Amino acid sequence: MTSGATALHGAPVVSAAGLAKRFGPITALAGVDFEVGAGAVVAVLGPNGAGKTTLLRILAGLARPSAGAVRYAGGADRRSARRFVGYIGHATFLYPQLTARENLHFTARLYGVEDADARIAKLLAELGLEAVADRAAASFSRGLAQRLAIARALVHDPRLVLLDEPFTGLDPVSADRLAARIEALRGAARAVVLVTHDLARAAALADRAIVLVGGSVAFASSGAPRSAGELEHAYRSALDAA
Amino acid sequence: MPAPLPNSAVDRAANALRLPTGILLAVLTGAWLAAVARAPLDSVQGIIQKILYVHPPLAFAAYAGFALTAIGGALFLWRGDEAWDRLARASAEVGVLFCTLVIVTGPIWAKGTWGRWWSWDLRLTITLLLWFVYLAYLLLRSFTEGSERAARFAAVYGIAGLAVIPLNYFALDMAAGRSMHPENLQQGSLGAGMGWPFALGALVCLVAFAQLLARRIEIEALRSALEERVAGAPTGLERSS
Amino acid sequence: MNTLLAILWKDLVSEWRSRDRIVAMALFSFLVVVVLHFALPGADPAEVRRVAPGLLWVAYLFAALLGLNRAFALELENDALSALAMAPADRGFVFLGKAAANFVLLAVVQFATAVVFGLAFALDLVPVAGPLAGVVALGSLGICSVGTLFSAVAVRTRYREVMLPLLILPLLVPVLLGAVSATASLLQGEKVPFASIQLLVVTDAVFLIVSFLGFEYVLDE
């Protein structure tokens, strides 16, 4: 197991080569190579329709690529890899009639989480949801729902965490909390793939950044972006070049 | 460089069958029409009875068609090769045509022989149910967004539809009283001189089915290759950078 | 197995808290019974007794279709369906959990409907209540199995509510015929013919197997 925040690239948790995805005549991804290791945060940037969500969904095992292969650590296939993937997407995946606690328990049972009670109590505390733990999810504000969605994604302690534009619509305090959470994941040797439009956050958090344009990788940084400005410059150049 | 045409077993079979079945169809149809014309007139039913040479043969094709649809779907789910889905879809589209003809010729025969436009006898009913399943299959395909998803949904439905045919048979058999349908037309029960036109009719239908199927598969394969080309997929193409 | 229970629990609890599906199903069922009564004006009791089994099952089918359509609406609300697709749980058991929940809800509605039906058509169902429950259960098993499978399909097509009946009504003919035949015998005070039970059991088995295995492919993207 890799240790600490200094291990930028531990063993690859997931690696994909030549990923392509077609939806009829539309190409969402056209030959993308991708890899993320334990304890690393990779930021995926790009304009809308560039294929970022498609890439995440393939990594999550939700979609099958039209071409290319995805390999998970330990040789797990798509089916068994589900066990260690956590996904936070545009939708919250919550059941409105169930309370926060019940939502988490349900997910824990689906994933066969051992010692679920302790884990859930810990997550509720870490995400500041204790006060609303026994309120129905339907009554949650966007921020609360987002936090619960994050807790839900982390219930089974996934090794690979995929986040699709998680900062959108979050107030600054919640956003800071989320950023801290991502840092904590990195510290715990988890692999994080972060799709975001927020260049500042991406620069602050990422160990590597790639820019997707029109389904291909237009830019891939060699290391951590040194500043938001540098990242923005790289982003804009990639857009212009494509 | 043009995108390579799909070259799976299904496509190769379709390509191989196209010409031979076309020729065979022309020849057989000629022979069949001649045989039908020469066949003796049934003393009771009159000329309407000649539908016998059309109606059951069409039914064979309709059922064979659905079997192919279901099997193609199952193989698609198992193997993931979209060529099997092409077979399933083509078979459904051709099969529904034959099934419709069965439903149309049935009442014509019924009116001519029993004086009623429709009867709920076992075979006609079960074919009617098959027709509904066919239509639901095709509607499902057109109403589902995403061709891969549509193929998968349709495959599952096709299998369910095939499984229900024997179930329907037993259900209707159990529920019905005496069937009005002419009893099983085995070798002996066909009158003299009716054997050949009937057998030829069956052959014509099956060959016609195969011919239409082969053509439909080809169209689908071409469409698929065209889509791939438009999408600029990296398979066998230089990508425009 | 854990998955099955988890999903069953989730669906029933959600339904209990909102009660929207069950109320709609029950109300709709009662209305159908009333409409059926109006559809047979001045029919003499013996005639009614003959067609009653069919009418009852028509009401049951309508209720089932309504309930099944809503079954996956719950999952679509926050895209929970994708979450289920991502779970490592065996999808066959996800299916069973959902089908079991549908079965329970349908059973409750069917019971209430039977009471209303008995009242509306002056039929005494109490003496045959036990066997009738068995027959209804067998019928519902068939309805809920393919119904659950294809409602997961229908809910992701363009005309969701319409798609489900189009898909499953041709498939449900064996269930309907077996159930109506058995119910008719019960109402006539006769023994249920073995053939009907056999038909129902075989159909249920086939449908359960196809649905259990097919659900795997239906949950994919």
Image (cartoon, coloured by chain):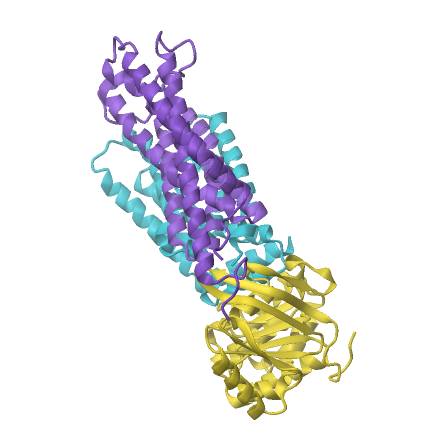
Chain colours: A yellow, B purple, C cyan
Can the viewer see residue B87?
A: yes
Report the residue at 34% width, 36% height from top: B97
Q: Nearer the viewer, residue A136 or A213?
A: A213
Q: Position of residue A37 (x, y in %)?
A: 70, 74
Is C142 rendered above or below residue A67?
Answer: above
Residue C88 picture quarter:
bottom right
Report the residue at 43% width, 38% height from top: B214
Report the residue at 49% width, 39% height from top: B70
Can the viewer see residue C186?
A: no
In this view, the residue farthest toward the front is: B1
Q: Is residue B15 left or right of residue A42?
A: left
Q: Position of residue B74 (x, y in %)?
A: 53, 42
Report the residue at 62% width, 57% height from top: C89
Number of numbered tags placed on the structure image: 0
Q: Is residue B26 left or right of residue C193?
A: left
Q: Is residue A156 left or right of residue C61?
A: right
Is C165 rendered above or below residue A65?
Answer: above
Q: Nearer the viewer, residue A150 or B182?
A: B182
Q: Nearer the viewer, residue B215 or A162?
A: B215
Is A218 rendered above or below residue C196?
Answer: below
Q: Position of residue B238 (x, y in %)?
A: 53, 63
Q: Position of residue A228 (x, y in %)?
A: 57, 91
